[in-house]
Amino acid sequence: MSERLTPGQIEQIAAELAEADRAHGVIPRITARYPDATVEDSYAIQGVWRDKNLAAGRRLVGHKIGLTSKAMQQATGITEPDYGVMFDDTVYQDGDEIPVDHFSNVRIEVELAFVLKGPLEGPDCTVEDALAAIDYAVPALEVLNSHIELEGRTIVDTISDNAAYGAMVLGSERRRPDEIDLRWVPGVLSRNGEIEETGVAAGVLGHPATGVAWLANKISQHGDRLEAGEIILAGSFTRPMWVERGDTVHCDYGPMGTITCRFV
């Protein structure tokens, strides 16, 4: 039986990650220093970091789900989904300029986001329950932001680092789940006019709302539930694309419109 991290170690790592977030830096892998750290430890680290941000006045607007597609699992070598939290000051809109210096290891992913019209609670949440709780879907790009060295990291490192979430860019096209077959929403991702990645939303666990049900069930293990009005980033259906200052990113979601943003 592996040893859990102590509350002091959890606080210390959360403080390191908070400092790395402020300084836009990177810390050594947690699993290199604490090989026995568990997934539960990593959610505890994330929880301490989240609560300190809430206490400092940031407002929670939703959750991101990561590592839901084979493309992302193969890109990271991690085989189960994870989640992180999203604050109000991390939301951008189509056409915005995004300061690249605010992030570390900056990459872009293609996703759908869902806005909930009612609460969603596990542990027995189904895809049908998730679809019934969703008000509408909107196209989204996720900006990844990793404060832990990438080489050799595991899901424990990623979850501790708020599932590598940095920001999201929301499109303007909204669709109710009964208006469109969400599985077949495409994503054609370009950087500076060149197509780099393509995919369809069915790549996310067969249906992007599957991730929403998974999230409701997962956070119920931590005594939590999803609330009406939350934005849920459902997971990428392309591999992450690296971006640098000066890059213009464009994604075409077919019937759900396009998103463009520029990194400055």
Image (cartoon, rainbow, N blue to C red):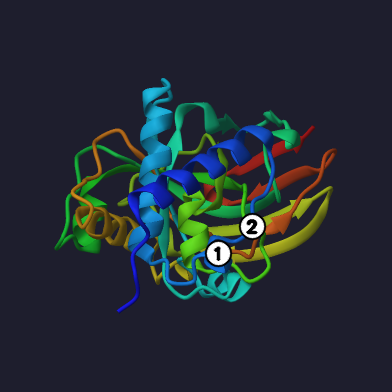
Which mark identifies residue 135? Answer: none
What's the amino acid at mark 2? Pro
Relative to residue 193, is residue 217 depicted above or below? below
Residue 241 percent coordinates (x, y): 71, 58
Relative to residue 101, is residue 13 depicted above or below? below
Mark 1 sits on what residue? 33
> Which residue is pictured at 51% across the width and 73% down the height?
78
Mark 2, Cα crowd under 10 Å, few <14 / some 14-19 / many 20+, is: some
> Which residue is pictured at 41% across the width and 20% down the height?
57
Where residue 80 sits, quadrant-wise, is bottom left
Residue farthest bottom in this picture = 1
Residue 260 percent coordinates (x, y): 69, 39
Marks 2 and 1, the one that precedes in the sequence: 2
Q: Dot 2: what SS?
A: loop
Residue 99 percent coordinates (x, y): 72, 31
119 left or right of 246? left
Q: Dot 1: what SS?
A: helix
What's the amino acid at mark 1? Arg
| Tag nearer the camera, 2 or 1 | 1
Query: Quick check: marks 2 and 1 in contact, CB under 8 Å?
Result: yes
Name the quarter where the C terminus is drawn: top right
Whether residue 181 is visible here, answered yes or no, is: no
Mark 2 sits on what residue? 28
